[in-house]
Image: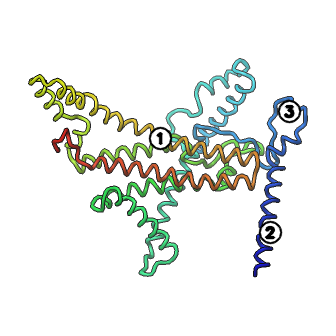
């Protein structure tokens, strides 16, 4: 038994070493070692035989309709010519394309990021439909997995806002967490960079792209979080929720203190009304920006890291990066959902205006 296990481990180590050597040889690092002096002098990037030099496009690429995709393709060509030869060497048509931008008119376009978010949404719905469709007293493996996930998230919510509010808040928090998580994890599938519309042998417009790397998706999630928290505050506290931002009680007390020549007390009350309240309102809006760019920055950086590692040293070296991105995807989903939960807990807590409850 021990001898068989030793042989199995040795065989596994041999495969890992072989893949590491193959990755080093076939990647850009290996290609750079064997690159000719002429190519180096010309400033050409060394490329391996399997994975071409990665191209990162921050704006989402147009997939449908076909007419808009053709315009986007022409825009990419014009942009490439401008980078190679400069603006002065562009034709009038190429000038017009660059001035017009990658998107034309007001057509409803479907980008590769939108497609990816739709796939994540479908998977999320299927996960719970299949998990709950044939619920049994003695659950199977899949039902058991779904129940553990739901119970874990419910306990996470209840631990912050209490059992009495958890059922109301749980659906939104769970949806945000799972949507971010699934979007991050399915983007690691090798099929993502290989599907698309080719120009020659290279994929010029990718069919799928991680939704988190398009700033519109993090912004949309941030808006959902913002609207949910504000709605929850009004639902639980009514118009009293506004005392968090407009502290009328502090203004009244400040005027009374001022009439009695209690300057220090008046200053404190008026500072609370004129500065602290508006600052609270401003912090609510700033949250939109921080939520958006935190998720967008981490997802985009992760995608670039995967592309670069696969380009430099394919196979084994990339597996470590994939493991890191699995962890990063989980942490980002937990942070986004967790912060939304914390702000929701703050919103449903009655504000006390200088000791006077509202």
**In the rendered structure, which disc, 3 or 1, sits on the residue that comes first in sequence?**
3
Residue tagged by mark 2?
10
* Callout 1 crowding tier (Cα within 10 Å): few <14, some 14–19, many ≥20: many
Q: Secondary structure at mark 2?
A: helix
Rendered image quadrant of residue 298: top right
| Label 3, residues with CA under 10 Å away: few <14, some 14-19, many ≥20 | few
* Image spot of residue 246 (x, y percent): 23, 34
Q: Is residue 358 above or below residue 128?
A: above
**Above or below: residue 76 compared with residue 90:** below
> Please, what secondary structure does the residue beneath circle 1 have?
helix
Q: In percent of the image, x 27 and y 47: which residue is there?
A: 233
Q: Which residue is mark 1?
A: 292
Residue contact between numbered discs 3 and 1, judged by CB atoms under 8 Å: no
The answer to whether residue 129 is above or below residue 173 is below
Q: Residue at x 47, y 68 (%)?
A: 146
Q: CA distance from mark 3 to mark 1?
A: 41 Å
* Tag of residue 40: 3
Task: Pick out the residue farthest to the left.
Answer: 260
Q: Position of residue 71 (x, y in %)?
A: 62, 35
Q: Residue at x 62, y 36 (%)?
A: 72
- Residue sitting at the far right: 37
Q: Secondary structure at mark 3?
A: helix
Say whether residue 94 is left or right of residue 186: right
Q: Position of residue 309 (x, y in %)?
A: 71, 47
Question: How far is the residue under mark 2 from the one under mark 1?
Answer: 47 Å
Give coordinates of residue 230: x percent, y percent.
31, 44
């Amino acid at each position: 038994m021990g001898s068989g296990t030793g042989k199995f481990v040795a065989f596994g180590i041999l495969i890992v070493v072989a893949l590491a050597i193959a990755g080093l040889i076939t990647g850009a690092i290996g290609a750079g070692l064997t690159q000719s002096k002429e190519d180096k002098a010309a400033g050409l990037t060394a490329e391996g035989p399997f994975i071409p030099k990665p191209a990162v496009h921050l704006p989402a690429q147009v997939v449908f309709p076909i007419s808009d995709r053709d315009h986007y393709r022409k825009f990419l060509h014009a942009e490439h010519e401008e980078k190679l030869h400069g603006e002065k060497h562009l034709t009038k048509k190429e000038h017009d394309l660059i001035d017009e931008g990658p998107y034309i008119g007001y057509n409803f376009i479907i980008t590769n990021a939108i497609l990816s978010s739709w796939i994540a949404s479908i998977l999320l719905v299927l996960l719970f439909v299949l998990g709950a469709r044939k619920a049994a007293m003695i659950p199977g493996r899949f039902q058991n997995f779904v129940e553990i996930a739901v119970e874990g998230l419910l306990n996470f919510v209840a631990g912050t806002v209490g059992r009495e509010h958890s059922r109301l808040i749980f659906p939104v928090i769970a949806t945000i967490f799972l949507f971010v998580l699934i979007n991050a994890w399915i983007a690691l599938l090798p099929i993502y960079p290989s599907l698309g519309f080719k120009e020659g042998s290279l994929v010029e417009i990718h069919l799928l792209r991680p939704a988190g790397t398009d700033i519109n998706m993090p912004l949309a999630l941030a808006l959902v979080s913002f609207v949910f928290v504000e709605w929850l505050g009004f639902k639980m506290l009514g118009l009293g929720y506004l005392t968090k931002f407009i502290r009328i009680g502090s203004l009244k007390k400040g005027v009374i203190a001022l009439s009695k020549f209690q300057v220090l007390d008046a200053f404190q009350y008026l500072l609370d009304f004129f500065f602290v309240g508006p600052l609270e309102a401003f912090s609510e809006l700033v949250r939109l920006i921080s939520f958006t760019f935190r998720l967008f920055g981490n997802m985009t950086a992760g995608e670039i890291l995967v592309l670069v590692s696969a380009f430099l040293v394919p196979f084994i070296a990339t597996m470590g990066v994939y493991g890191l991105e699995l962890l990063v995807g989980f942490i980002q989903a937990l942070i986004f959902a967790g912060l939304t939960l914390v702000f929701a807990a703050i919103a449903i807590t009655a504000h006390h205006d200088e000791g006077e409850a509202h």
